[in-house]
Amino acid sequence: MRFDILTIFPGFFESPLKCSLIGKALLQKKLSVYLHDIRAFATDRHKTVDAIPYGGGAGMVMKPEPLVAAVESVPRQEKSLRILLSPKGTLFDQKMAKELAQKDQLILVCGRYEGVDERVKELAIDEEISIGDYVLNGGEAAALVIVEALVRFIPGFMGNEASVQRESFEEGLLEHPQYTRPAEFRGLKVPQVLQSGHHEEIEKWRREQALKITQERRPDLLKKVAKEIKNA
Ligand code: ADE
């Protein structure tokens, strides 16, 4: 899978892309990430990428010319989607991650300032996505979140394919609690059933725990699962 990230801060991505599984996948070419500096597409002497909003108001708006030129400069693959990260977008979730992971290429456009000129969306964007109901300084952190959520679906990325399947949200529920050695730590014991080796009992316990924790913390998810089952 290929990601093209358009940003005025390419340096933002340097260390996260070097670390951990993503760094390894990049070296192994299971994944490619290309960073494009939007400022390089500004044509004036000062390399201007923003301007004051028409109609007045606080803050600056990203100008359309450098942004559209930057998007248009990216070579397109067959299954490719141009995404603008913005707090006004459709809310990103695990289901969307799974769908987007089917693409060959995502072009992630990081907005900054008060937003981008509306015409950019018409000319050079297919979808607007938000990672949550809060406002970030720009789309860069959101783009990283999307890369990180999607790469987990790349075959061979995780090393252990089963762990992608079992995780929180994969069945619409939060994940059951996890324990590792030692069996007792500061007086706190690992539940007996997990040490029993009895696979059916363990599965049952995990399922019950997943339901319990989801009910306590995210009853909205349970309602969503119930609705999906009803409509299936
Ligand atoms: N840019 C600013 N806030 C954002 C958010 N919540 N999601 C995506 N991009 C953003």
Image (cartoon, grey):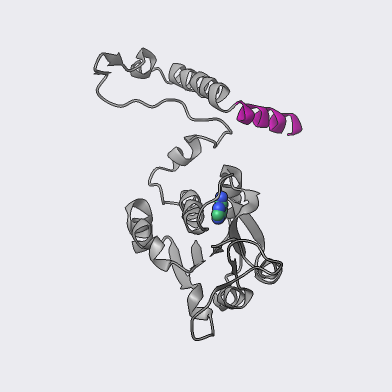
Residue 215: x and y, percent?
Answer: 57, 22
Q: Residue at x 70, y 30 (%)?
A: 229
Q: Is residue 176 above or below residue 186?
A: below
Residue in the foreground of this view, choosing between 220 and 222: 220
Q: Residue at x 71, y 30 (%)?
A: 227
Specify whether residue 37 is painted magenta: no
Residue in the foreground of this view, choosing between 46 and 75: 46
Q: Main secondary structure of the magenta part?
A: helix
Quarter of the image for the C terminus: give it: top right
Query: In this orientation, does residue 7 appear?
Result: yes
Total count of labels: 0
Q: Is residue 163 above or below residue 149?
A: above
Q: Image quarter for residue 60? A: bottom right
Query: Residue 222 vs residue 145: left or right?
Result: right
Residue 51: x and y, percent?
Answer: 59, 72
Query: In this orientation, does residue 101 appear?
Result: no
| Highlighted range, magenta | 219-232
Residue 65: x and y, percent?
Answer: 61, 78
